[in-house]
Image: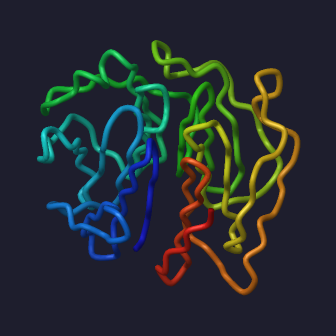
Amino acid sequence: MKQIDASNGLVFAVDFNGNVFTRRGGFWARVPGNLGHVTVGAAGVWGVGRDQKLYRLVEGSWAILAGLLMQIDAGGDQIVAGVNRGNIVFCSNKQATVTAANYFTPTYRRIAGKMKYYSCGPGTCWGVNAAGYIYCRLKVKSESCVGSDWLRVPGLFQMVEVGTNGAVYAISRGGVVYHRVGISAHKPQGLKWARIHFLGRKFRHVTADLGTLWLVETNGNIVRCH
């Protein structure tokens, strides 16, 4: 696979040819369609095509929605957020997200700043910019997905992912996986990074759900870590 996302007990992934899969039991089941990036969360299953068009899985079929994005995340409190080709960050509030089903929906709000990757969880979103700097977006709410401020967090990374329980994982430019320690309501940015050791393995993507880490190695192999 090229990229993977897990939430609420569901796992979706896309391979290097854009084929879409979901996990059923111990096997991968093909989902019709072709995408560059897929996400699953409280807001449902969403994806962006390799032409940046936005899709949502509605009653078993992909509905084309408004917007052009490179990457999207549905892991927040029934909000979606993502970045476009110009690294501009957008989000859609809960009311607009849950009713989105056609080309005229949802409506978006622009978030100040530029990110190449953006991921949301309950209460905060995290982003990585083109230089690899990582930021926590504070006070993100279902009715106000824009949030309030960016808070710079030390480290250089290629991607970051927020789990359904608010846990934050990131992958460094060297393919090393880290977990953010000390996240709380009073300190949403956490205290420090803790390295997760996988001897001899380098990764391109990580997602977390229900006590399980799903990781994609740089060569596309998938690792599941309970």
In this orientation, which residue lies closer to the viewer: 213 or 92?
A: 213
Q: How many marks?
A: 0
Say which quadrant the N terminus sits in: bottom left
Q: Is residue 15 left or right of residue 205?
A: left
Query: Considering depth in this image, is 87 or 123 the residue closer to the camera?
Result: 123
Relative side of 47 to 206, left or right: left
Residue 163 placed where, x, y %? 58, 44
Q: How far across and how far down the image is residue 36, in percent?
A: 32, 62
Residue drawn at x 13%, y 31% is 102
Q: Residue at x 21, y 67 (%)?
A: 30
Please state the horizontal and vertical placement of residue 141, each as a whole percent of the image: 54, 18
Residue drawn at 64 percent across, 36 percent down? 166
Quarter of the image for residue 28 reads: bottom left
Q: Dividing the picture into quarters, in which one does residue 57 lie?
A: top left
In the picture, measured across the screen, residue 144 lies left or right of residue 125, that is left
Give the color scheme: rainbow, by chain, secondary structure or one colour.
rainbow
Q: Is residue 86 above or below residue 213?
A: above
Instruction: Specify whether 95 is left or right of 2.
Output: left
Q: Residue furthest right?
A: 191
Q: Residue at x 35, y 64 (%)?
A: 25
Picture quarter with the C terminus: bottom right
Image location of residue 115, percent across then percent down: 56, 45
